[in-house]
Amino acid sequence: MGSVEISSGKPTPLEQSGHPLVFLAAAGDEAAAHGEEFRSEVMGLGQFQKEGLVTDLATGRAWRLVADEGKYLRGTDMGPAPLMHWAAGLHGDVTMRIADLAQEAGIDFSELDVSFAQGFASKGSFARGEAVALVFDLKWKVAMRTGAPKPAVESVVEEALRSSPAVGALTGELEGVFALSANGRAVPVLGVPQSHAPAEVDPFLRYANRPSPVEAETLTEELQWKQPASEAAQQELGDDQSGTIAFYVCGSGPYRVDSGLVESRIDFPGAGASRWTLISDRTNRRAPSPLAYFSLGTAFCYHTQLCRYVAVRRLPAGSPRLVQGSTFTGEPFDTQLFINGSVDDAQAKSLLTAAANTCYAHRALTVPVESGQTIEVQA
């Protein structure tokens, strides 16, 4: 991460980086635990490519990840989409809590596989500033191989869904708050709640160099990989659509009983997108924790909408940067946006608000989402 922005006409930064898509960027405190407060910092690298740091504020432990979009948004598909990080966080958090609660209840199991589907939609013209994101129809399916009676397993699953901070954020109604810095000046926001948190530092100024892995901690586990799409896209998310385009984000994968890690395979059925697998670790040590993924995925998703709006409106703005504070203790996600260029204050405000209205992850925090589940117990 430096102060020099890279244009999309040059070779992509993700091809040049020489590092894995995800790596530990700060070792932090040894006493890593279930963090519930994170700072996500996102920088654009050209088109929809972006990199981010997500820091567990309780420990200082930080992971660097990257995101991209697929052909459905005319992206280059070189990293997991923002909603794939978000979905891996949701899937990982629920899966790990089911495993933990089952063990606490004395339920022995040899296999645990969890899947979910979350519906999203975009309605209205993005180009005309009329678009809004919609969120609907959250479904869970849990399969456990155990000798325990089904009612005991059902009780564990229901408690896991009740206690999951990621599910709580998704099914609640807590609108995010925002702050705006345009060319180094604080500008009041319009159309969204104003953040009153202390001003953050623009990530391009905060970091003199792009992050590199912590040499003292060698991670042997492959943390992310993709399976190329086997189908052509049935629809493309356009900027000037008149109707509603709906799609599903689907996640599935097992809890690895031997290691305690979760494998989340994330897909956008019908979008012609590659399927990405992301590994998570409840302790945030061997891989990002589920809430780290959920937090950074939310910030990544908002950044994609910013980039779309800059492009479609041809705004004279450099690549936007943002810092997002995310807590899972009843406080709203707090996003501070940094814009430089010859944009005026009205354009900067419009950019921030349009992105908030169309960001699927932020919209999911704002509106209530109904959830249902199916439980299978295999002897």
Image: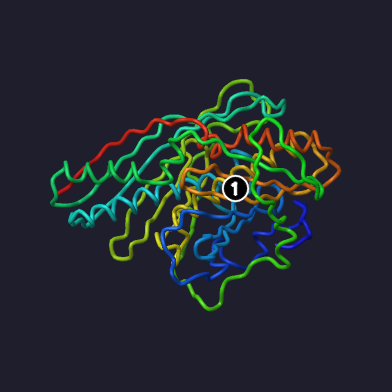
Q: Position of residue 84 (x, y in %)?
A: 50, 47
Whether residue 335 is visible to the viewer of this picture, yes or no, is yes
Residue ID at (59%, 33%): 236
Residue 357 sits in quarter? top right
Height in image: 324 above or below 361?
A: below
| Residue furthest out toward the top | 242
Q: How many numbered marks, from 0 up?
A: 1
Height in image: 249 above or below 6?
A: above
Q: Amino acid at mark 1?
A: Phe
Residue ID at (58%, 61%): 64
Q: Is 32 on the left or on the right of 345, as rendered?
A: left
Secondary element under disc 1, as helix, strand or loop, is helix
Quarter of the image where the N terminus is located: bottom right
Query: In this orientation, which residue lies closer to the viewer: 189 or 245?
Result: 189
Query: In this orientation, which residue lies closer to the viewer: 123 or 362?
Result: 362
Q: Position of residue 97 (x, y in %)?
A: 33, 51
Disc 1: which residue: 300
Residue 369 sits in quarter? top left
Q: Residues within 10 Å of mark 1 (few under 14, many from 20)?
A: many
Query: In this orientation, which residue lies closer to the viewer: 209 or 76?
Result: 209
Q: Position of residue 174 (x, y in %)?
A: 51, 36
